[in-house]
Image (cartoon, helix red, strand yellow):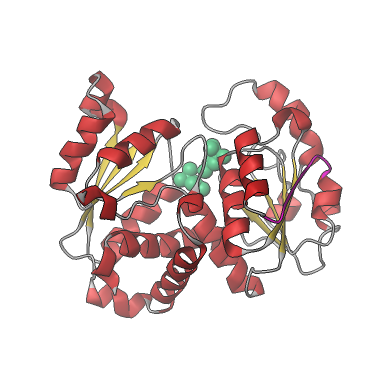
């Protein structure tokens, strides 16, 4: 019963639209008041445990800095160095960590393991990326869109490339934040049927296609991601299938003249995106990376409830 009230941040489709919008505004507010909030130290006495089963630059550092700037502390762990690596269950790990820390952030490919951790934790659990989704990233992305282009509601975002974890969270966001999302993926690398069904059942304004130029036509924002995500095999097959989906100058010119380019990073320059686009005037990728810090302050404050009120 106690765990029913725990505010986990697991996936955007598990939270109602008004709650996500409130969380977005909280993140923007914490960004605009960042110097004053750093003095207030709303997370004083709070400890975040971070478990990384996969590499990370942005997620790891932005969560760590977010906690420190607001007065809290972090413990950095890998699955291998915990007893998890020797067979202690996820459920028991969740029960034990809950007795020590105030929140848990985990990056683990197995999405079921994330769900199991949250089911047995009595403190908030935050999804720091699984094979299925990357919700923290898309909160930062929507924030970045709105800073550059105003409210995202009714606007058009284009995704060209692989149907991966980042795309799944974009699909959830399109429905919750009410914008159009035009997707182009190779037919062989289409989104999972469950995601497509979710979009249809929830009347999301998402189109699932295979033509990069058609997806990008007139869009306000063009997004892509790596051709080979963590845990993916078949490097060469993926490269061959995804080459026509590269974001280059010619493709960007099909978008609206003032369109922005986003990428969660790390980018593989010359593969899914060219230097011309990454370093060009429409690219907002480093604002996007910075906003991971601000978006996560909001997520942490929401999870820890009144902590930053
Ligand atoms: N975008 C993102 O999550 O980057 P990291 O893998 O470096 O955390
Ligand atoms: N889709 C990428 C995102 C990395 C932040 C991956 O899963 O590797």
Name the residue rendered at 70%, 68% in the picture.
154
Image coordinates of residue 166 in percent, x first then y, are: 57, 45
* Pick the front one: 33 or 186: 186
Q: Quadrant of residue 225?
A: top right
State left or right for residue 286 relative to residue 305. right
Chain part drawn in magenta: 204-211
Percent x, y for residue 177?
Answer: 59, 63
The residue at the point 31 percent across, 59 percent down is: 303
Residue 180 to residue 189: above or below: below
From where the camera sits, is residue 219 visible? yes
| Front residue (pair 206, 54) | 206
Q: How many marks?
A: 0
Residue 121: give x, y in percent of width and height.
24, 42
Q: In the figure, is residue 13 to the left or right of 102?
A: right
Q: Nearer the viewer, residue 77 or 107?
A: 107
Residue depicted at x 40% and y 34%:
108
Answer with the quarter of the image where residue 197 lies: top right
Q: Does the magenta segment cover residue 208?
A: yes
Residue at image position (28%, 51%) is: 4
Percent from the top left, x then y, of residue 55? 43, 36
Check if residue 233 falls in the magenta segment.
Answer: no
| Quarter of the picture holding the C terminus | bottom left
Q: Decide if residue 44 is on the left or right side of residue 163.
A: left
Q: Is residue 53 visible?
A: no
Q: Tell me which corner region of the image, top left, top right, bottom left or bottom right, holds residue 155.
A: bottom right
């Amino acid at each position: 019963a106690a765990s029913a009230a725990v505010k986990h941040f697991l996936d955007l489709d598990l939270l109602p639209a008004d709650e996500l919008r409130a969380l977005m505004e909280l993140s923007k507010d914490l960004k605009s008041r960042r110097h004053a909030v750093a003095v207030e130290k709303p997370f004083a006495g709070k400890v975040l445990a971070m478990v990384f089963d996969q590499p990370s630059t942005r997620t790891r550092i932005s969560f760590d800095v977010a906690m420190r700037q607001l007065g809290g502390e972090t413990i950095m762990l890998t699955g291998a160095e915990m007893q998890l690596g020797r067979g202690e269950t996820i459920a028991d790990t969740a029960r034990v960590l809950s007795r020590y820390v105030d929140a848990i952030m985990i990056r683990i490919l197995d999405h079921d393991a994330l769900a199991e951790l949250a089911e047995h934790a009595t403190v908030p659990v935050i999804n720091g990326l699984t094979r299925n989704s990357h919700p923290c990233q898309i909160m930062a992305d929507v924030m970045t869109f709105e800073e550059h282009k105003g409210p995202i509601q009714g606007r058009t975002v284009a995704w060209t490339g692989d149907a991966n974890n980042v795309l799944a969270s974009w699909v959830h966001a399109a429905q919750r934040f009410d914008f159009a999302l035009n997707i182009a993926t190779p037919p062989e690398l289409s989104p999972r049927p469950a995601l497509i069904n979710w979009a249809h059942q929830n009347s999301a304004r998402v189109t699932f296609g295979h033509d990069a130029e058609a997806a990008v036509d007139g869009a306000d924002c063009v997004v892509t991601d790596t051709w080979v995500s963590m845990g993916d095999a078949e490097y060469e097959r993926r490269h061959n299938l995804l080459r026509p989906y590269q974001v280059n100058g010619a493709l960007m010119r099909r978008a609206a003249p003032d369109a922005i380019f986003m990428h969660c990073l790390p980018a593989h320059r010359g593969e899914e995106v060219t230097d011309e686009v990454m370093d060009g005037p429409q690219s907002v990728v480093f604002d996007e990376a910075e906003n991971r810090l601000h978006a996560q302050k909001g997520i942490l404050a929401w999870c820890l409830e009144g902590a930053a009120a």
